[in-house]
Image (tube, rainbow, N blue to C red):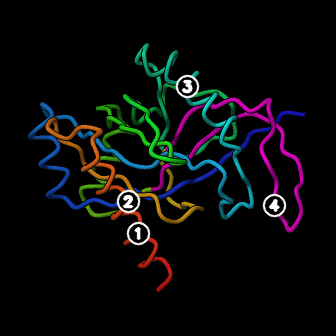
Amino acid sequence: MKKLLIDSIGCLSVTPEQINESMAQNNGKVILSGVMQRADATNQNGRQYPDDILRREADKYKKVFVTERRALGELDHPDSGVVNLQNVSHNVVDLWWDGSDLMGKIEILGTPSGNIAKELLKSGIRLGISSRGMGSVKNIGEGKVEVQDDFEIVCWDLVSNPSTQGAFMSPLNESVTHDNKQNKYSKVHSLINDIISVM
């Protein structure tokens, strides 16, 4: 039986200066980039997303929602499998893979919830990025469950309490592309975050 699956992947960790720079280089828009989801890894909820299922759903999500500019997410998770337009804070504008990390780029919108997110980020508050989907899970032992083939991505939301360590988003300016330099930066940033999280 399908149920609502919510998983927080990491934090948006940015400085006010980075937000201001992103706005200056993106015509007043705050654009952030980082890890959205991780395949074949157990998160703090004890849930694993098989690589083939997550890739299939991410590709489908990108083809439909990202391409049609309606990959909207909310500020905080509701208990629903539907995105409530009144609470929308951001739009996912790109998705791509770096190994088993699903990377993404989000635009913070000028909606009431988007403005709250922007002000929190400008104040140095860390926000998590978190997936919301529908599907069933199978117990695979040792307190772990695996997402099954009926999984569907609903969206990614901004939340206050992430459950998975090591995934941070950073402001993005127009000159940054998905080249090796950006991928190396993401990996270094992720490693630094892992070290800090253990301390």
Amino acid carrying label 1: it is: Leu
Q: Residue at x 71, y 60 (%)?
A: 45
Question: Is 162 displayed left or right of 82 in the figure?
Answer: left
> In the figure, residue 153 lies in which quadrant?
top right
Q: Residue at x 55, y 48 (%)?
A: 100
In the picture, residue 22 is in which quadrant?
top left
Q: Are marks 1 and 2 in contact (CB under 8 Å)?
A: yes
Name the mark on residue 191: 1
Mark pair 2, 3: CA separation: 22 Å
- Position of residue 167 relative to residue 88, above or below, is below
Image x and y of residue 193, in percent = 41, 70
Task: Please state which amino acid type lies under the numbered disc 3.
Answer: Asp
- Residue at (10, 38) in percent of width and height: 25
- Provide the residue span drawn in magenta: 128-157
Secondary structure of the residue carrying numbered label 1? helix
Q: Determine whether label 3 and label 4 are within 8 Å by CB.
A: no
Q: Which residue is mark 4?
A: 144
Which residue lies at the image location 68% right of the left edge and 36% below the top edge? 52
